[in-house]
Amino acid sequence: MTTAADVLARCDALAACSDNPDHLDRAHLTPALAAAHGLVEGWMTAAGLRTWRDQAGNLCGRVEGREPGLPALLLGSHLDTVPDAGRYDGMLGVLMAVAVVERLRDEVTTWPCALEVVGFTDEEGARFGTALLGSRALAGSWDDAWWALRDADGTTLAQAARDFGLDPARIGTAARQPDDLVGYLEAHIEQGPLLEEADRSLGVVTSIAGAQRFRVEVVGEARHAGGTPYPRRRDALVGAAEAVLLVESTARRTGAIATVGQISVEPGAVNVIPGRAVFSVDLRAATDAQRDATRHELLTGLEALCAARGLRMTVTDLYEAPATPCAGWLRDALRSGVVASGDGDPMDVWSPAGHDGMAAAAVTDVGMLFLRCHDGISHHPDEAVREQDVAAGLDAFTTAVREVAHHAPARTAPGDGRSGARAEARA
Ligand code: HGY
Ligand code: MN
Ligand code: MN
């Protein structure tokens, strides 16, 4: 049986699948993602799952229930990473799901549902700017406009998909229908300090924050750094610097969380006033209303700031996901799991971090189990989890999956032709 120590060893092995020799960086549709798929597919097969890769680039595996073709309880997380990532954000949830299926596979054949594991791709959105591409394809909310997105090298998403062996024309086959699914359960590191502060191994997620990402372009005038007196300067970077401070102060005031994680300046010469500055904004809030009010207040402030400095500002939206409540019945099952694992009274937590469940919720109920992570650190190589917490998480997840499967709405295997994904899963 795959133990917590085995799961952690697999996380270590996966961390070697990187597009960068110096640190972990595994973006959407890269050779490193293909290498990770190779490893995970082997572990899925050993756990008794029949595997395939869907046309979005998600790695999938399935064990049938008491008859072939029943709706599936989907377990998973993501296999892509941010640049210079830790080794648990996403991967731990996929590998825990595989280990849980291995524990349950002999019982699943008597269940009124199938079990599937999905290793989503592009949860982070690090390569093309738009996140959740894999889970949105699975949820049937794909937008064909995304094929024209370009990475930093100018490669379109469509070309990257073809280079990865995918067929953009068949993206619709990755989509699941509500009747194909019982629900979606994900285990994930907390990426925050609450569990550690409470000295708890596990938490049951109540909801996932609403998120938005956009790019702000500030245009001034590039001129001689020495010869241009202050009254005549329209310095895009000084405007952007004020804007960064405004992003923080606005979000602090409204109770949202906003981050400028990228900034670039042109022409980027030591003796030229910056004529153009472009920065990203990542905005999250507990509710969509709070997120949208923060955005409105922020953009109003940015416009005033730019006007005062003679700068022009353009905003380009990159990504939006709604605040997502976790389903009560799945939370109850996870709470039973936490109790069975010996972690005591289940602790509720909410998630300011984004997850594939935000997309999956468009097609099925979602639930999430959080595991304590050291010092709340994530999106950093120092991410760490304790073996004892992974062991408790495996016990809790196993109990929860069993409980969900037995409370799954009774359905029979549907007729053919309703879902390409199911046809592919059955093939
Ligand atoms: O950015 C996020 O919240 C997530 O880790 N993808
Ligand atoms: Mn992440
Ligand atoms: Mn994640």
Image: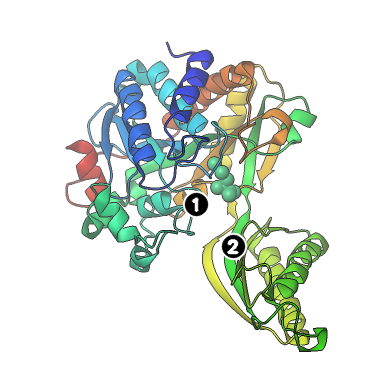
Return the residue nearer the eye: 276 or 343: 276
Q: Amino acid at mark 1?
A: Ala
Eyeballing the image, is 415 above or below 130? above
Q: Which disc is residue 72 wearing?
A: none
Q: Which residue is mark 2?
A: 212
Q: Check contact, mark 2 vs mark 1: CB within 8 A.
A: no
Q: In which quadrant of the rendered view does residue 128 lie?
A: bottom left
Eyeballing the image, is 207 above or below 288? above
Q: Quadrant of ligand 2?
A: top right
Question: At x 53% / y 44%, what residue is drawn?
Answer: 83
In the image, is the residue at mark 2 within 8 Å of ligand 1 by its beta carbon?
no
Give the number of the mark in front: 2 or 1.
1
Eyeballing the image, is 174 above or below 75? below
Residue 315 in the image, given as x and y percentages of width and height? 59, 75
Residue 229 in the image, given as x and y percentages of width and height? 80, 85
Q: Which residue is mark 1?
A: 126
Label 2: few (<14), some (14–19) or many (≥20) C-alpha neighbours in 10 Å: many
Q: Amino acid at mark 2?
A: Gln
Question: At x 26% / y 36%, what residue is drawn?
Answer: 52
Q: In which quadrant of the rendered view does residue 372 lie?
A: top right
Distance (Cα) linking label 2 and label 1: 14 Å
Label 1 element class: loop
Residue 335 in the image, given as x and y percentages of width and height? 62, 30
Return the residue nearer the eye: 119 or 342: 119
Question: At x 67% / y 44%, what residue is drawn?
Answer: 350
The quarter of the image holding the N terminus is top left
The quarter of the image holding the C terminus is top left
In the visual, does 181 lie left or right of 129?
Answer: left
